[in-house]
Image (cartoon, coloured by chain):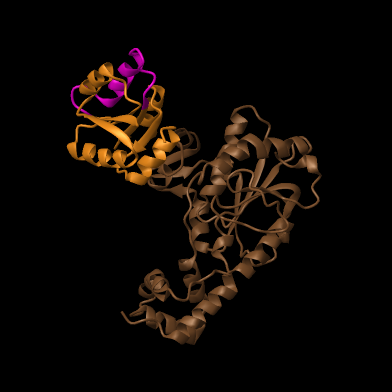
Amino acid sequence: MASIADADFAYIVREIRARTGLAIDTSKAHVVESKIAPIARREGLLSVQELASTVSARREDRLIEAIADALIDKETQFFRDRSPFAYFRRTMAPELLSRRPEGQRLRIWSAGCSTGQEAFSLAMTGEDMKADGKHIEIEIVATDISTAVLEKARSGVYNQFDVQRGLPIRSLIQHFEKIGDLWRVNDRVRARVKFEKRNLLADPSSLGQFDIIFCRNVLSSLEPATAERVLDNICDRLAPDGYIVFGAHELIESSRITQATIHGGVYTFDNDVPAGAQAA
Amino acid sequence: MKSCLVVDDSRVIRKVARRILENLAFETEEAEDGLVALARCRKQMPDAVLLDWNMPVLTGIEFLRQLRREPGGERPVVVFCTTENDVDHISEAIRAGADEYMMKPFDSEILQSKFIEAGLI
């Protein structure tokens, strides 16, 4: 198979990096080619080479965005890695609620939410805690750069394969309704989550402050310098005694968060927190 | 090593399930209907049962109800594995004492995920 011309490939990599911060291994042009091949077909172009030369000649935003979309890792599942959700229920939520005025909502940000499973897993956990008699109200803001994943997330509709990965059967029965062969998250759970299209490179201050931020498997996909900037922006949005959760296998280093992982990918935020306010 | 009894009237499904389970380090036994499965359990209770619904002689749900009444029959973790995928069937299975529920078609990832949910892995 012929490869994308070097100049066209360089242009695409430059544009994607500038727009998304995504780290692209330039030695793996064939990986990029296989991921963007469906776009070439959809556009009625003969090959990925033609797509690349078209993009680089016309500089069309729409096509660049479609390519970025194809290159972003969308892998997610309900209750992925399990332990952060157990820790949320057992420790993070009760502890934060005890420190907040009664009746105040816990605000959670699912940053890089992909198709919404993480946000809905948190919303379901909140509903389960309520069913257990806990006084908890949560508000989840879930953001992603990709229009395609947000569309699926907003619909709350998943196929049989999606709902069998990580989701206990009792949660499926409790929080979903069946529509034909598909399953939709029920209205009560969907009402807890607000999805918003957002680029993590942009200033997130209009989102307000959060008690907990889930930003899992996002930073490790970015260029290191960009990841640092994004992490900085995210930390600015976190309450002084808040929690930040990364992917279970991500190693995150920043002077703004405590270095010790307290549970799976859960880190405490270390921005002038009184010593007693941190989780043990 | 944990043991799992695979109960399904399809030899193909039993073979597929067996291969996946053995990769997950389970010792497996097979039964082609609920009655054979019940006899196996009376001899020795397995740690887990992977259970089809529609089978001749004794169906999965009938087997499960009887199993839970047997001495020691509360112990095996029972995971349904069936083409029945509506809310009524799932609810009925849970009420009868199923621990997890898997809808066919399944693959090794789904089986593993369900066994983790059920606390078997």
x, y percentage for residue B107? 32, 45
Q: Quadrant of residue A164?
A: top left
Could you tell me which residue is drawn at 44 percent across and 76 percent down? A27
- Say whether residue A59 is left or right of residue A199: left
| Position above or below: A32 against A99 | below
x, y percentage for residue A117? 51, 48
- Say whether residue A245 is left or right of residue A272: left
- Say whether residue B9 is left or right of residue B51: left
x, y percentage for residue B51? 29, 30
| Position above or below: B117 against A160 | above
Could you tell me which residue is drawn at 47 percent across and 56 percent down? A75
Q: Which of A23 and A175 is in front in this view?
A: A23
x, y percentage for residue A249? 54, 52
Q: Quadrant of residue A132?
A: top right
| Position above or below: B76 against A40 | above
Q: Tell me, what hue is chain B?
A: orange
Q: Nearer the viewer, residue A44 or A40?
A: A40
Q: Inspect this view and state whether residue A34 appears.
A: yes
B63 magenta-colored: yes
Q: Tell me, what hue is chain A?
A: brown
Span colored in magenta = B55-77
Could you tell me which residue is drawn at 74 percent across and 42 percent down? A278
A266 magenta-colored: no
Q: Which of A170 and A88 is in front in this view?
A: A88
Numbered disc total:
0
| Position above or below: A221 against A259 | below
Q: Inspect this view and state whether residue A189 appears.
A: no
Quarter containing the N terminus of chain A = bottom left
Query: Furthest-front residue in view?
Result: B1
Quarter containing the C terminus of chain A = top right
- Say whether residue A144 is left or right of residue A75: right
